[in-house]
Amino acid sequence: MPGATRPVGGPQLAQIRRVVSEIPGPRSRELLARQRTLVPAGVGATLPVFVEAAGGGVIVDADGNSFIDFGSGIAVTTVGNSAPAVAGRAAAQLSRFTHTCFLVNPYESYLDVCEKLNTLAPIRGDKRTILVNSGAEAVENAVKIARAATGRPGIVVFDHAFHGRTLLTMTLTAKNKPYKQGFGPFAPEVHRAPMAYPYRWPTGPENCAEEAAQALVDLLDRQVGAENVAAVLMEPIQGEGGFVVPAPGFLKQVAAICRDRGILLIMDEVQAGMARTGRMFACEHEGVQPDLITTAKGLAGGLPLGAVTGRAELMDAVPAGGLGGTYSGNPVACEAALGVFEEIEEHDLLERAREIGDTMLEHLSALADTHEVIGDVRGRGAMVAVELVERHGDRVPAPDLTARIARRCHENGLLVLTAGSYGNVLRFLPPLSIPDALLEEGLAILSEAVAQEAAATG
Ligand code: PLZ
């Protein structure tokens, strides 16, 4: 395809849904066939349409289809794809220099990103930030720092957690297939506690926070020994695990349990952080102050950047040379991140995330009232999901139905993602730049898909 005819992305892209071919269309199918000969089978695709441009609330593919985006590249393009401040700053940086390695010659934009994160992170006292390349790398570094600072080896994580695909972060991740199967042996000193998952708590949501906290205490004090545990690591709202919002008060209880035992609390804000939930960090909703916070995804609007922000005395426990990486805190990614902060401030995107959340929750709650296959509706801000079950009350996961609804949405020009330990969660992560009309249209397509597939099942 000649480059000159390719559409330009960003907010100037026509904000319309348009389905002009079967999905995927002929050009995407051709490219997918090419992918099969070049890329290993282990690399999947949720919706294999090849992208030409994206921006505002749409993604345009190689066949000319324009999809309403309820995925944001898995919570990455939160401020919009090719958002002006992100694209402008990154482009300007590309023409200055692309790389020096911050460990060889530093540059100021790295410091500007760290200053922003140190100022915004809900952590007490003096703070420091290190920049890395990805969410997994942020989590790896948070664990290294926690171990160095405490002199303890153990890490406690939760059921349904996702923390990455590297050896350590894959070990920290809960779900076996597809993330872990065949990839062992795993990293040592990782222990797992039950998550306070209200919808699936055996004795009911009202007992969830208290009993889950008790289970954590039991794991720490009786099974592992608190003096062997460097950190408890958790997502403030679980992402891949199905947008599980921990029972109210649970995060606070975990923080107190950690504090009493000299265990550090690491909040993995890679998916829920960076304005996604209507606060800059999702743990702010629960009034919790962790010791370390990991960010990535939304941090640089799609350029690879991750960070660990933490209490200065912990972060400084690692001697010079102990942390780093060739590309970590790449200058183009740093400029993009500064563009993300600008977009959030300029367009009051925290408020926009809350508005989007209100619209989605209202619509989806009404949908749950009329369709008993929707067992649970949950989320915060622009991070909302529905959990699908055989019928209301039985809580039997319905992964096939979930996949069929997702496919029907895709065929009608709405990109939705699935999630969940049982594959029965549809999650919605629209970019905060999505116009209201597209948000409403997307929700209408979803309702239609639920109605049609539920009828086909029932
Ligand atoms: N921590 C909470 O959500 C990445 C994974 C996509 P990376 N989630 C999307 C996939 O299938 O690999 C994630 C996360 C949380 C860490 C990570 C890892 O972030 O940037 O993908 O390494």
Image (cartoon, helix red, strand yellow):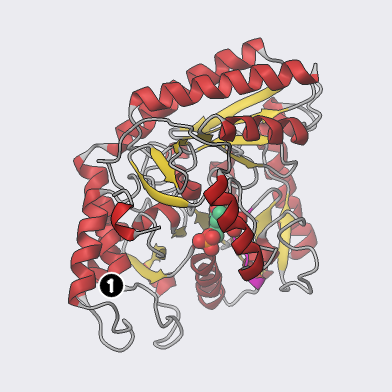
Is residue 258 among the parts visible in the rendering?
Answer: no
Toward which corner of the image does residue 315 lie, by quadrant?
bottom left
Residue type at tag 1: Pro
Q: Which residue is drawn at 77% across and 55% down?
A: 177
Tell me the quarter of the picture where residue 157 sits.
bottom right
Helix, strand or loop at mark 1 = helix
Residue 241 lies, with reference to residue 223, above or below; the image says above
Q: Magenta residues: mostly which secondary structure?
A: loop
Q: In this view, does 430 lie above or below 258?
A: above
Task: Determine which residue is flagged by label 1.
Answer: 331
Judge from the rendering whether residue 101 lies leftward or rightward of residue 137; answer left or right. left
User: In the rendering, at what x and y percent does residue 427 appear?
Assistant: 57, 36
| Residue 216, image x, y percentages | 70, 50
Identify the image quadrant of the N terminus: bottom left
Magenta span: 162-167
Asked whether 254 falls inside the magenta stretch, the response is no
Establish whether ligand 1 lies closer than 8 Å to the Cβ of label 1.
no
User: Seen in the image, is 249 located left or right of residue 96?
Assistant: right
Between 165 and 62, the one lying in front of the other is: 62
- The quarter of the picture showing ligand 1: bottom right
Residue neighbourhood size for the residue with mark 1, other residues' Cα within 10 Å, grouped as few (<14), some (14–19), many (≥20): many
Q: Classify 385 as above or below 128.
A: above
**Residue at the image position 27 percent from the left and 71 percent from the top:** 110
Side (left or right) of 445 relative to 11: right
